[in-house]
Amino acid sequence: MEPMTESPPLPDVLRSPPAEEPECNFNESESALSDNNDHLNVAIDPFREQFYTEFDEGVLEEKIQRARHNAPINIQFESIGSAWIFNAAERLHKTIQCFQWEHLHIRESLLKNLPKVNESLGIKSPATPLQKDLLTDLYYPKRTHENSGEIYVAVALHVLNHVLKTRSIIVRHSGRRKAVAGKVDECELEFRDLGLTRPKVLILAPFRHAAYCIVSTMIEMLFANSNGQSFVTNKRRFYKHYGPPENFTPKHVQGKARHQLPLEFYLQFQGNRDDCFRLGLSVAKKSLKLFVDFYKSDVIVASPLGLRSMIGVEGEAHHEYDFLSSIEMVVLDQADVFLMQNWKHVIHVMQHLHQLPNRDHGVDYSSVRMWCLNGMASRYCQTVLLSSIGSSELRALLGHHCLNYSGLVSVVEPQHTSEGCIGSVLVSMKHIFHKMPDCENLVDEADVRFKYFTERLLPAYKHSETMKQTMIYVPSFFDFVRLRNYLKKEQWSFVQTNEYTSEKKVSRARCLFYHGEKPILVLTERFHFFHRYVIRGIRHLLFYQLPTYSNFYPELCNMLLQPSLNKQNHQQTTSTCSVLYSSYDDLRLSGLVGRGRAHNMMSSGTNCILLTGR
């Protein structure tokens, strides 16, 4: 057993309970809000070019269509590896090719704080290659617990730079209006620098602990060189509701042998794991307000469930989403975890972005950007999607909801470069891969899979003595319900566990399966993700679909190493693992067997492929 290693270090502000700070004045002067590199006499700032360039609707659509016909561009980044640029505007390509900090026009005050924030993470260089490479429109499926600290710093830097620049421009324009008040016609001095509502940045995170890390890093980024003087309102309340409790042990870990759980499980569920929250932040150069009303916030940090419960649906008494009308940046942290929670909540939130408000929220329409008024806000919004894996759901989200006219940088998924994790299986067993018939479209895939599974694979497990003690692994909860109902209808003897099963029923199901009183156990992927129970007594594994996380496959296979109640029968029976896959499971299969072998298995005319291990 390997010793437990420490989780990645967090900024200093996370390590001790914060004290309440006095609230400062939010009405800074124009000079106080302006950094040296904000002046208009420098080279064009990508921020200004993106958000302060007005296009006629027809011109913008023509620009987008022209970019779509351009071939994707492959670029090798210093830290994130190979990436493709899709629908790229010339500006985005140039910025990536000739990267220097001055090309990004980061505010000087933030750049001064960056080395100290990195130092608190144990990073000696002022800025890491990873932090530099993350400052673009991005799909990044290589997030890990090891690089999470660097990512939080990059996100905090990018978000604060965006918010402070916007505020600086608004204050500067307000000063100019006051300076010429009564001297020139207001129509001659038109500054369009506002959205329809105030919130500019939306950060989605799966748990309160992730929100705690992000906001705490933002605090560190703002006040790293302020000699301990940080003007943060409601800091104590934030620490109480989002910080980790003292001597905290996750509920999932209680009562289990620690050596049986992988390290990444502890890192995933450390701290406060509540998944229903929403938090508004108001940002200025020298102050930060927490727990602010959304319509007075610059940044919203929330979980998909937290926003979903606030947005509601049409017809409900509470159906509120105007605060999402002018979002200019969306950050999805640990997007793969959203797949394990409820992906529909993410889609619901994304569908309500950039909708025209139902009510007037006191905005001065003469100062609202024309692309907001024309319903083109989605074309200007930047999306940063961070995940530890690549998946078809994440790709679909990018294709349907990420419409930035500047294009997208998509990092090659780790599944395309790995050799697969099937080599981590320690059990001597047969791996039988069944390729189901091709479907005309993804909509029909669920029906074809269910029919093939119940008619071609399941019958061999019903009356065979040698195929008893089989665990069926089902990634989708909807597929699980469908399969469970089928087994009940056909009067199969089985037990089942899912993420909604009580601990008492889980214990009973595991006991019945282990003692052979029930020959089949049906288990959902989300149950395994959130609990990681070690199931004893397994002789055979049957995958309804490949796991979303490739490392789950060897984890489950290695459960066969656990002692069985009937050791003699267990030794006489050759263990098997059968997998049903389709042409839509390319990424999942690549992560398991490697890209080259997956390509051969997908293109093979054989519907059944046998691999042997150990």
Image (spheres, rainbow, N blue to C red):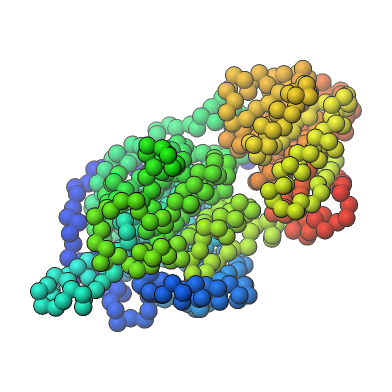
Toward which corner of the image does residue 328 lie, by quadrant? bottom left
Q: Quadrant of the C terminus?
A: top right
Please state if 552 lies on the left or on the right of 371 as rendered.
right
Horizontally, residue 444 falls left or right of residue 431, namely left
Q: Residue at x 86, y 49 (%)?
A: 607
On the image, the x and y values in percent for residue 113 come to 34, 62
- In the image as oriented, which residue stretches furthest toward the left? 182
Residue 184, x across and y down, in percent: 14, 78
Measured as percent of width and height from the top left, residue 549 is found at 65, 46
Residue 147, image x, y percentages: 52, 55
Please report the residue visible at 82 percent of the width from the left and 33 percent of the height from the top: 458
What's the residue at 70%, 28% (across, down)? Answer: 485
580 or 349, nearer to the observer: 349
**In the image, what residue occupies the spot 87% across and 47% down?**
608
Left or right of 475: which side holds 128?
left
Quarter holding residue 180 = bottom left
